Amino acid sequence: MVTKPAASELICVGAVTGARGIKGDVRIKSFTANPSSIASYGPLYDKTGTHIYVLKITGQAKSQLIGRIEGTSDRTAAEKQRGIQFFVPRDSLPEAVEDEFYFSDLIGLPVEDLGGKSLGTISSVENYGAGDVLEIVGVISGGLMLPFTKQAVPRVDIQNGLVVIDPPDGIFDPPDEEAKESDSV
């Protein structure tokens, strides 16, 4: 019997992006260092840790994996799986080596600029298709989305619990009044 992990211990390792074919296969975007290892960390859970998915990787197409979720036997069922995220308990994953970390390690860390000025905390790490983005809250109303690049984020210090950013010029400037007026026309 598998014990239910606490949701706070779970790390997202992949997601179903759509159906493939007519026999119930799904396309999977893996977030693991070795994409095909997504099914090798043990049971895969939903984000609450209450539902277990049994996943078998059957192939690869372009930059995604092809797999089958147990109980999904046709395209209609596979299409309903779109958007499912797969999670594993943190202790199922290998320890991060020096200068590596899991994105979940960043959540809640304080953020400073190069001069040491506090800018808030990281609330999430997202990827909308063009690269990873840090969402920083406490800086400006509504938060700040910053590309997670070496140029914009020169230092991530998990050991000391700090992220240092070098934000692009003008990112904290108030919106241009003329631009606001032309947008509303």
Image (spheres, rainbow, N blue to C red):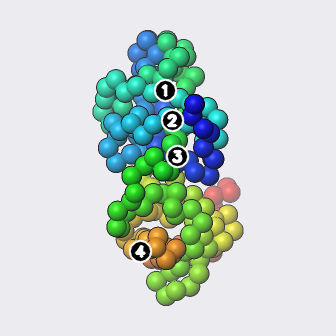
Crowding at mark 1 (Cα within 10 Å: few <14, some 14-19, many 20+): few
Residue 167 can be seen in this image: no
What whole-number distance in Å separates the C-alpha atoms at marks 2 and 3?
9 Å
Q: Are marks 2 and 1 in contact (CB under 8 Å)?
A: yes
Residue drawn at 64 percent across, 35 percent down: 50
What whole-number distance in Å separates the C-alpha atoms at marks 3 and 1?
15 Å
Secondary structure under the numbered disc 1 in the rendered image:
loop
Crowding at mark 4 (Cα within 10 Å: few <14, some 14-19, many 20+): some
Quadrant in which residue 102 is drawn? bottom left
Rendered image: mark on residue 89? 3
Quarter in which the C terminus is drawn:
bottom right
Sequence-first disc among 3 and 1: 1
For the residue pair 147 and 44, the one nearer the viewer reads as 44
What whole-number distance in Å separates the C-alpha atoms at marks 1 and 4?
38 Å
Which is more foreground, mark 1 or mark 4? 1
Badge 2 amino acid: Leu
Give the residue at mark 2.
44
Badge 4 amino acid: Arg
Residue 63 can be seen in this image: yes
Rendered image: mark on residue 155? 4
Crowding at mark 2 (Cα within 10 Å: few <14, some 14-19, many 20+): many
Sequence-first disc among 2 and 3: 2
Badge 1 amino acid: Val
Rendered image: mark on residue 54? 1
- In the rendered image, the residue lying farthest to the bottom is 115
Which is more foreground, mark 3 or mark 4? 3
What whole-number distance in Å separates the C-alpha atoms at marks 2 and 1?
7 Å
Sequence-first disc among 1 and 4: 1
Residue drawn at 43 percent across, 12 percent down: 23
The answer to whether 121 is drawn above or below residue 75 in the figure is below
Residue drawn at 42 percent across, 53 percent down: 131
Where is residue 70? Give x, y as percent: 49, 20
